[in-house]
Image (spheres, rainbow, N blue to C red):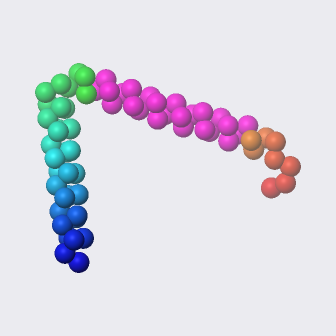
């Protein structure tokens, strides 16, 4: 049980350090941070739109169901 607890503490510590780094980047470089976030959102939404188009195309070719 003790090695698992040690790993849990390391994992929690890394998550906290990562959150501090992201928060510091948001405060220090707000324009850059916002542009990166908007780019990532456009990439995610672009994938979702493509996926929904392929799904609707596929549903048009279904014979059964």
Q: Pick the quarter of the image with the N terminus.
A: bottom left
Query: For the point 86% across and 49% down, which residue is it?
Result: 63
Residue at the extreme front of the image, as rendered: 3
Asked where in the image residue 48 lies, by quadrant, the reply is top right
Query: For the point 20% across and 51% down, which residue is it?
Result: 14
Give coordinates of residue 20: x percent, y percent: 15, 43
Q: Is residue 45 left or right of residue 28?
A: right
Query: Where is 60 relative to 6, above or below?
Result: above
Which residue is at the front of the view, 57 or 1? 1
Query: For the point 17% across and 62% down, which residue is it?
Result: 9
Q: Pick the quarter of the image with the C terminus.
A: bottom right
Q: Is residue 34 left or right of residue 17?
A: right
Query: For the point 18% across and 31% down, which residue is it?
Result: 25
Which span is picked out in magenta?
A: 34-57
Residue at the extreme bottom of the image, as rendered: 1
Query: Where is 9 relative to 15, above or below?
Result: below
Is residue 1 a member of the stretch shown in magenta?
Answer: no
Residue at the extreme right of the image, as rendered: 63
Asked where in the image residue 13 lies, by quadrant, the reply is bottom left
Query: Where is 1 relative to 25, above or below?
Result: below
Which residue is at the front of the view, 10 or 46? 10
Give coordinates of residue 46: x percent, y percent: 52, 30
Give coordinates of residue 10: x percent, y percent: 19, 58
Of helix, strand and loop, which mostly describes the magenta segment?
helix
Is residue 40 a member of the stretch shown in magenta?
Answer: yes
How many tags in the picture? 0
């Amino acid at each position: 049980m003790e090695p698992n607890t040690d790993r849990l503490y390391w994992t929690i510590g890394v998550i906290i350090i990562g959150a501090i780094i992201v928060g510091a980047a948001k405060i220090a470089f707000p324009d850059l941070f916002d542009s990166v976030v908007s780019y990532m959102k456009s990439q995610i939404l672009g994938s979702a739109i493509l996926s929904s188009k392929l799904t609707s195309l596929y549903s048009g070719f279904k014979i059964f169901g």
